[in-house]
Amino acid sequence: MRLFVALDIPEAVRENLAGMRRDFPSIGSQLRWVPPQNFHVTLKFIGSVPPEKLPPIIEALRRVSLVDRVQLRIRGVGWLVNAKTGVILLATVEDSKPLTALATAIDRRLERLGFTPENRAFIPHLTLVRAGRDLPASSQTALRELAEQHRQYDFGSMTATEFHLIESKTLPTGPLYSKLQSFPLVAAGN
């Protein structure tokens, strides 16, 4: 099983993000647009685990609690070029201390089960487009221009009431995400 922990996003935000694709001229088949139903904010990538690890993971995630409400605003578009993963166009999530606290709490709970904690800063985002490292310079320029045009675009905001454990299955048509369990966000002490 390939697992990750994420926040779902409201339909209105999902539609705003998907609308960007309609406004964007095609630059070739090398771009893999993320289907709108797969938009999410990853809190923790767990990776491949045997099925017997699932119950302890669920129990650990049930114990995550927070002090503050998790509110976030999805504003702006950026892009990254990574030697390992290729080119990614992403919607940025404004800095949110409660969101970072949630990701940290999840990381700590799963560390107790032997999962490696994150060794880099948590940078919340929603992946919109993926492309290989061999994306032509003209396509990279087009993506960079798209990101610049939407640098301050407000896609919407949300208050998270729950987070999810999600299984990712790779199919010939792309990844299929299935929610295995949802966890309400409960303030510490409640």
Image (tube, rainbow, N blue to C red):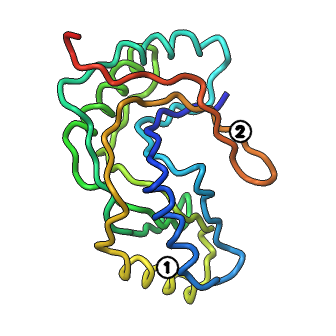
**Above or below: residue 166 compared with residue 173:** above
Q: Tag 1, which secondary structure?
A: helix
Q: Residue at x 43, y 56 (%)?
A: 13
Residue 173: x and y in percent read: 78, 54
Q: Is residue 155 left or right of residue 138?
A: left
Amino acid type at mark 2: Lys
> In the image, is residue 89 above or below residue 176?
below
State left or right for residue 125 relative to residue 134.
left
Q: If the image is split into quadrants, where does the N terminus sit? A: top right
Number of other residues with Cα within 10 Å of mark 1, as a class: few under 14, some 14 to 19, many 20 or more: many
Cα–Cα gap, marks 1 and 2:
27 Å
CB within 8 Å, label 1 to label 2: no
Q: Quadrant of residue 148?
A: bottom left
Image coords of residue 111 (percent x, y): 39, 20
Q: Secondary structure at mark 2?
A: strand
* Residue identifier under label 1: 143
Q: Residue furthest front?
A: 12
- Taking depth in this image into account, of 116 and 169 the one nearest to the observer is 169
Is residue 108 depicted above or below 37 in this figure? above
Instruction: Name the residue beneath numbered marker 2.
Output: 169
Residue 154's spot in the image, x, y percent? Answer: 32, 66
Please name the residue shown 58% across and 64% down the image. 130
Q: Is residue 97 left or right of residue 143?
A: left
Q: Residue sitting at 22 percent across and 51 percent down? A: 95
Tell me where residue 14 appears, x and y as whole percent: 49, 56
**Residue nearest the viewer, comparing 160 with 55:** 160
Q: For the C terminus, which image quadrant?
A: top left
- Give the left or right position of residue 172, taking residue 167 as reference: right
Q: Are there few (<14), some (14-19), or many (20+) residues within 10 Å of tag 2?
A: few
Q: Amino acid at mark 1?
A: Leu
